[in-house]
């Protein structure tokens, strides 16, 4: 437990430093955020077009889907900000030889890498997600209580940790291919399935996004609870996050033991 607290403290120190570095280039930060918001608005436009031909989707209205979309963006924004450096393990750290320098530090290399994340476009995700959540709560007349706010904050962080754990698991590919970004991205984009009610999918897709790559616990089950649909699956989210991180650390340490320097 002492080591866990120490690693968390070190990670927060890295994040604080990364934020300061990120804010040095403020114009880049603003442009990146705006471009990301524009990309997501195009996605929302697609959802709007879908609902021009139907009133509900598996019993979910347009407002319900937008709330689900907003809750998803909250977790995605936090995850991208905290774990974006995982995409760089292969091309930046291992291929260029910088990973050898990280190994000389008296902390676990994974902490050093994810602590170096400074993806400012993640703020665009988070900002748009927050706007959608607030707007949909008003439209759906959902009473906003202090307990609900705490629940949203807690499960958004849990959702981000689930995404981070899944990306960490697949980042081990970089120890053999030196190209972690393509592999992570291929599996990470599976989360887009859960931006819609999972009842519209067949059995295989449901199995994929609830058991194999459990992205449904990121936002789908929490949103069902916020809408009063009484999804008790929501309370499995912390357990899913813990199990995934246990697996992620185990496979990452296994891959680390197989690491061979590029000799760069």
Image (tube, helix red, strand yellow):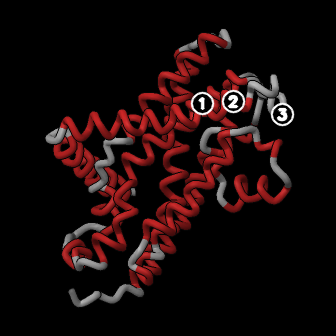
Q: Residues within 10 Å of mark 2 (few under 14, many from 20)?
A: few
Which SS class for mark 3? loop
Q: Which label's residue is closer to the chain start, 3 or 2? A: 2
Q: Is residue 255 left or right of residue 159?
A: left
Residue tagged 2: 49
Would residue 155 be seen by someone viewing this image from the given angle?
no
Tell me which residue sits at (53%, 43%) in the image: 158
Q: Which of the labelled discs sits on residue 212, or is there none? A: none
Q: Name the quadrant of the C terminus.
A: bottom left
Residue tagged 1: 45
Q: Which of the labelled discs sits on residue 58, or is there none? A: 3
**Looking at the rendering, which quadrant does residue 224 occupy?**
top right
Q: Nearer the viewer, residue 82 or 184?
A: 184
Whole-number angstrom distance, CA of label 2 to CA of label 1: 6 Å
Which dot, 3 or 2, sits closer to the camera?
Answer: 2
Q: Quick check: marks 1 and 3 in contact, CB under 8 Å?
A: no
Q: Quick check: marks 2 and 1 in contact, CB under 8 Å?
A: yes
Tell me which residue sits at (39%, 63%) in the image: 87
Whole-number angstrom distance, CA of label 1 to CA of label 3: 19 Å
Whole-number angstrom distance, CA of label 3 to CA of label 2: 16 Å
Q: Nearer the viewer, residue 201 or 42?
A: 42
Q: Name the quadrant of the N terminus.
A: bottom left
Which SS class for mark 1? helix
């Amino acid at each position: 437990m002492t080591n866990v607290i120490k690693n968390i403290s070190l990670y927060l120190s890295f994040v604080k430093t990364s934020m300061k570095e990120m804010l040095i280039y403020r114009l880049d930060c603003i442009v990146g955020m705006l471009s990301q918001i524009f990309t997501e608005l195009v996605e929302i436009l697609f959802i709007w077009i879908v609902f021009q031909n139907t009133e509900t989707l598996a019993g979910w209205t347009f407002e319900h889907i937008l709330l689900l979309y907003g809750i998803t963006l909250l977790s995605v924004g936090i995850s991208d900000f905290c774990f974006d450096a995982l995409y760089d393990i292969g091309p930046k750290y291992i291929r260029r030889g910088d990973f050898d320098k990280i190994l000389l530090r008296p902390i676990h290399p994974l902490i050093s890498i994810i602590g170096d994340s400074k993806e400012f476009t993640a703020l665009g995700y988070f900002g748009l997600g927050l706007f959608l959540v607030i707007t949909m709560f008003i439209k759906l007349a959902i009473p906003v209580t202090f307990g609900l706010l705490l629940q949203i904050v807690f499960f958004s962080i849990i959702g981000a940790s689930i995404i981070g754990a899944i990306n960490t698991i697949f980042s081990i590919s970089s120890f053999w291919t030196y190209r972690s970004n393509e592999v992570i991205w291929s599996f990470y984009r599976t989360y887009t399935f859960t931006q819609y009610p999972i009842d519209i999918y067949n059995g295989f897709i449901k199995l994929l996004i609830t058991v194999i790559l459990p992205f449904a616990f990121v936002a789908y089950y929490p949103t069902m609870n916020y809408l009063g649909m009484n999804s008790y699956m929501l309370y499995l989210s912390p357990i899913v996050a813990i199990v995934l991180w246990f697996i992620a650390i185990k496979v990452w340490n296994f891959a680390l033991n197989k690491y061979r320097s590029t000799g760069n």
